[in-house]
């Protein structure tokens, strides 16, 4: 080709030009800034506006935050320290309130020599939950998962260790009954798995606990529910409600799809009634109305009542989220399960729920995050969650007048909890997505 | 604060009665009757007094860093516990909110409510409680920045006023401005802490709540001197402990414990000299009767002879409790005012111990 035109062109370059640096505006930071911050006049204006807002916020909050005083015994001492070091006009946060009240914000009125117990209980929770969350861990750890609730109860409330042990034994009794009867008749086995433990708890548990206590009185110091407070209270209510509401919500969702009218309509009524009334009303019901109906002198633990109400409330939401997942499955999946000859529970367990729950993960985690934040509503029935404690701390003469520091701290703590839950949900979605393909 | 909460209930009670507790009321009466049959026996069997307090109000009740409750109302609980058990720590404090306090008392969850609660007609009669006395005479006042140059609440025409919603404070304010034929613009606020922030940020010219709450709030300001409390007090808020209606023996114990603290101040019995004065009969027969070295007053209310001595030893007499929790040497800095002894121009007065 080049030979053809050899005589018509006076000069032909036979070497490559050395590579030149791209224009300054097309590389590195400048290119990025030009393309992302100033691509059009409108965007340029918005960029300057945003920069101004960022500057304004940082210049107002930054000094307050970074001048923060961490060691003082009262708000007035904070102010003295600030006047001495920065001058009276400087703006400085008084984080000393958090330093001083840190154990109280975390543990509430829990006895200080037993602070290790909620901490260990939390670790037990993480160890127990990890094989459920991460499938790479050995399956044998699931035994620990079953034991974790009893261990956590023992650590948190204490008392004789035989109570939780014997209650746990009830489940074992049910399991044994199920194993023995399953080959004979599956209905009988299911019934015995439910009835045997109940009979055991009602008839035998009391005397057995009594005898064991008499023989070997081991246990921790009992700690009343009213001593729980701060983040311990929020986390205990949150974790208990999250763990209890997921199975209950799934059952309700299945119940709502049931062909049996009684089951179907009780599920519908339960979900609609619970969901149709604000949580705060249920909490007032638990704390006030129940007092009138229970016989005088009944000591029905307020925290237990709250956990039950929050669980029922969030179960109704979970049920609707899971129902969305169930509805999203093509009808063919249900028919295929039937065609394989699987019974109802097997088809749900093996075919329907794994797919439906996978679809529902974002919604479920969303509900859990909402539930965890809703635990702060217990402040209205006189429990000392972190918000309630903030009020109580402000009511002491040392810290009266402190405001944002406490809210900031509580907000950051809640953010950490909720953000981790959100990240786990993303991880789970990604993992299941890959397996799907 | 003390204020606003004390006032919050009127409306709430009415609402509660009419809506939530429609059916529960009959049962409530029943339950209250049963539970209060012999409160003193229940308390003695339990070994501790269940005392309802606020979830936190400066000077009146608040937990310290170790979770130990302290405050003016708390000391009232401790005095009653000391009168019964001789031990001021035999109290379980039950924090209650404006909404939960009356139910807690009616249902028997608590034996005594010492929660800066205003003594009103409907609470005493319709809600079936008995106020055993007044431990603090409060009233609604106004705070304004000094720079505003206002010296009387009647000069506040057209002012913006920070006010807690759903309280009788709001109604008192409306009444006051209407009576004086001046106008104002309310800025609704939910809690006292929020009100402090709004007032300091200049969202309102005036902050109104109970005078004790205003004083406590002003004490937390960077420069308290820049703000003044106006002289007008526009409402009566007698705050006092209360018990369930129907168990008069129990009510007597609470009432006479409070009276004993007041009488102790009048007679010069303090926490420091009570042990000495109570050891043997003195020259003053009323002191002797009060401290149980003469007469049988303790037995008449089912307590030991040294009940009042223990109650006074728990935290001191009325004046000492006042000075320690809310008096002029505390950051709250309240003057005795109406709460001075009747001999010094106040309203605090105890019937004779005879």
Image: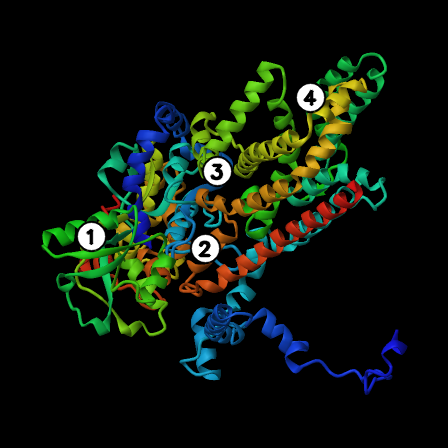
Per the image, the residue denoted by label 2 is: A392
Q: Is residue B113 left or right of residue A351?
A: left
Dot 1 and dot 3 residues touching (CB under 8 Å): no
Q: Is residue A358 above or below residue B190?
A: above
Q: Is residue B320 left or right of residue A41?
A: left
Q: Earlier in the sequence, mark 2 or mark 3?
A: 3
Q: How many marks?
A: 4
Per the image, the residue denoted by label 3 is: A279
Q: Tell me how far mark 1 sits from mark 3, CA to CA.
A: 33 Å
Instruction: Indicate the quadrant containing the N terminus of chain A: top left, top right, bottom left or bottom right.
Output: bottom right
Instruction: Indicate the quadrant containing the C terminus of chain A: top left, top right, bottom left or bottom right.
Output: top right
Q: What secondary structure is found at the residue carrying circle 1? A: helix
Q: Earlier in the sequence, mark 4 or mark 2?
A: 4
| Chain bearing mark 1 | B
| Chain bearing mark 3 | A
Per the image, the residue denoted by label 1 is: B173
Residue at (80%, 17%) from the top-left corner? Answer: A341
Q: Tell me how far mark 3 sits from mark 4, CA to CA.
A: 30 Å
Which mark's residue is nearer the viewer, 3 or 4? 3
Which mark's residue is nearer the viewer, 4 or 1? 1
**Label 1: few (<14), some or many (≥20) within 10 Å?**
many
Q: Position of residue B323 (x, y in %)?
A: 33, 63
- As drawn, the label of residue A198 is 4
Dot 2 and dot 1 residues touching (CB under 8 Å): no
Are both tags, 4 and 1, on one chain? no
Q: Earlier in the sequence, mark 3 or mark 4?
A: 4
A146 or A184: nearer the viewer: A184
Q: Tell me how far mark 2 sits from mark 3, CA to CA.
A: 23 Å
């Amino acid at each position: 080709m080049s030979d053809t035109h050899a005589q018509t062109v006076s000069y032909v370059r036979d070497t490559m030009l050395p590579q030149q640096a791209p224009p300054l505006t097309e590389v590195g930071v400048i290119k990025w800034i030009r393309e992302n911050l100033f691509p059009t006049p409108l965007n340029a204006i918005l960029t300057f506006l945003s920069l101004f807002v960022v500057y304004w916020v940082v210049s107002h909050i930054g000094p307050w935050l970074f001048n923060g005083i961490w060691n003082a015994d009262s708000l007035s001492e904070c102010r003295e320290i600030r006047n001495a070091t920065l001058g009276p006009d400087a703006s400085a946060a008084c984080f000393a309130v958090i330093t001083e009240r840190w154990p109280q914000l975390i543990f509430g009125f829990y006895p200080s020599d037993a602070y290790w117990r909620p901490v260990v209980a939390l670790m037990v929770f993480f160890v127990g939950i990890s094989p459920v969350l991460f499938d790479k861990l050995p399956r044998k750890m699931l035994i620990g998962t079953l034991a974790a609730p009893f261990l956590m109860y023992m650590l948190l409330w204490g008392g004789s260790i035989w109570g939780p042990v014997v209650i746990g034994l009830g489940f074992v009794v049910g399991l044994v009954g199920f194993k023995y009867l399953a080959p004979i008749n599956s209905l009988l086995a299911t019934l015995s798995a439910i009835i045997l433990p109940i009979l055991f708890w009602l008839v035998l548990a009391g005397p057995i606990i009594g005898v064991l206590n008499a023989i070997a009185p081991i246990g921790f110091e009992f700690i009343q529910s009213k001593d729980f407070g701060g983040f311990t209270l929020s986390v205990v209510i949150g974790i208990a409600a999250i763990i209890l509401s997921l199975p209950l919500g799934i059952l309700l969702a299945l119940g709502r799809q049931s062909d049996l009218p009684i089951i179907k309509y009780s599920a519908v009524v339960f979900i609609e009634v619970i969901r149709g009334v604000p949580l705060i009303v249920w909490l007032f019901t638990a704390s006030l109305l129940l007092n009138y109906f229970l016989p005088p002198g009944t000591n029905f633990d307020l925290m237990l009542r709250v956990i039950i109400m929050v669980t029922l409330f969030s179960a109704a939401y979970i049920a609707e989220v899971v129902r969305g997942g169930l509805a999203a499955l093509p009808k063919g999946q249900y028919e295929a399960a039937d065609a394989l000859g699987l019974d109802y529970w097997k088809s749900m367990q093996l075919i329907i729920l794994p797919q439906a729950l996978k679809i529902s993960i974002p919604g479920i985690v969303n509900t859990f995050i909402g539930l965890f934040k809703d635990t702060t509503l217990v402040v209205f029935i006189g429990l000392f969650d972190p918000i309630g404690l903030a009020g109580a701390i402000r009511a002491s003469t040392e810290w009266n007048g402190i405001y944002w520091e406490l809210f900031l701290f509580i907000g950051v703590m809640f953010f950490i909890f909720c953000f981790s839950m959100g990240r786990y949900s993303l991880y789970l979605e990604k993992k299941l997505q890959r397996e799907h393909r | 604060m003390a204020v606003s909460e004390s006032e919050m209930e009127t409306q709430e009670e009415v609402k509660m009665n009419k809506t939530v507790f429609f059916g529960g009321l009959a049962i409530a009466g029943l339950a209250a009757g049963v539970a209060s049959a012999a409160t003193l026996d229940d308390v003695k069997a339990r070994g501790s007094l269940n005392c309802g307090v606020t979830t936190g109000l400066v000077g009146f009740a608040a937990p310290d860093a170790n979770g130990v409750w302290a405050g003016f109302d708390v000391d009232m609980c401790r005095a009653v516990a000391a009168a019964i058990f001789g031990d001021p720590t035999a109290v379980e404090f039950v924090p209650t909110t404006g909404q939960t306090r009356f139910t807690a008392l009616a249902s028997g969850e608590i034996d005594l409510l010492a929660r800066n609660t205003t003594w009103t007609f409907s609470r005493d009669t319709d809600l079936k409680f008995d106020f055993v006395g007044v431990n603090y005479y409060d009233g609604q006042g106004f705070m304004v920045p000094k720079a505003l140059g206002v010296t009387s609440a009647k000069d506040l025409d057209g002012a913006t006023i920070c006010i807690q919603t759903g309280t009788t404070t709001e109604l008192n304010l409306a009444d006051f401005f209407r009576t004086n034929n001046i106008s104002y613009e309310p800025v609704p606020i939910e809690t006292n802490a929020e009100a402090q922030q709004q007032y300091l940020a200049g969202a309102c010219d005036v902050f109104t709540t109970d005078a004790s709450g205003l004083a406590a709030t002003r004490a937390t300001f960077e420069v308290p001197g820049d703000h003044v409390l106006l002289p007008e007090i526009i409402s009566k808020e007698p705050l006092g402990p209360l018990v369930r209606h129907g168990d008069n023996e129990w009510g007597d114990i609470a009432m006479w414990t409070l009276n004993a603290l007041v009488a102790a101040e009048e007679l010069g019995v303090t926490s420091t000299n009570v042990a000495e004065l109570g050891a043997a009969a003195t020259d003053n027969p009323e002191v002797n009767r009060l401290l149980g070295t003469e007469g049988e007053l303790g037995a008449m209310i089912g307590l030991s002879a040294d009940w009042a001595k223990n109650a006074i030893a728990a935290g001191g007499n009325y004046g000492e409790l006042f000075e320690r929790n809310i008096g002029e040497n505390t950051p709250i800095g309240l003057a005795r005012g109406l709460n001075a002894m009747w001999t010094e121009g106040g309203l605090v007065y105890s019937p004779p111990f005879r």
